[in-house]
Amino acid sequence: MPAEYMTSDAGCVLLLSGTVDIFDSASLHDAAREAAKSGGNEVSIHLHAATAIDTSATQILLALRRATQRRGGRVLFCGAPRSITAFWTAGGLAQELSGER
């Protein structure tokens, strides 16, 4: 499964692995929805094991970041490989989808 959600004392964690694309968007959306409604103030998105992310997955991550910020929380993007940061940079989203926001 390319998207897994889990909670910890510090908040919630979303683990992404492999290629996350439109075919995985339903499971990613479900995991992001769980993270958003968990009520935690911190969501960590771990991208260490991800190899590629398409625009549908990017849109879901943007929506999760915005929902978390609306409730006063923050999102931390961890370990994005160069292939993903290059994709986000080309789309003008690298600032929004990297590091802590």
Image: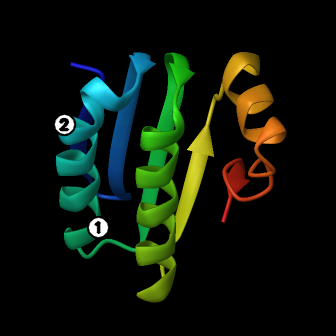
Circle 1: residue type: Ala
**Foreground residue among 91 and 73:** 91
Q: Residues within 10 Å of mark 2 (few under 14, many from 20)?
A: some
Q: Which mark is residue 27?
A: 2
Above or below: residue 51 compared with residue 92: above
Whether residue 72 appears in this view of the structure is: no
- Residue 14 appears in which quarter of the rendering? top left
Please provide percent x and percent y for residue 2. 30, 22
Kindly identify which residue carries mark 1: 36
Left or right of residue 83, residue 54 in this image: left
Residue appearing at x 66%, y 66% in the figure: 101
* Colouring rule applied to residues: rainbow
Q: Residues within 10 Å of mark 1 (few under 14, many from 20)?
A: many
Q: Element type at marker 1?
A: helix
- Residue 27 appears in which quarter of the rendering? top left
Left or right of residue 2, residue 73 in this image: right
Please provide percent x and percent y for residue 8. 27, 51
Left or right of residue 39, residue 13 in this image: right
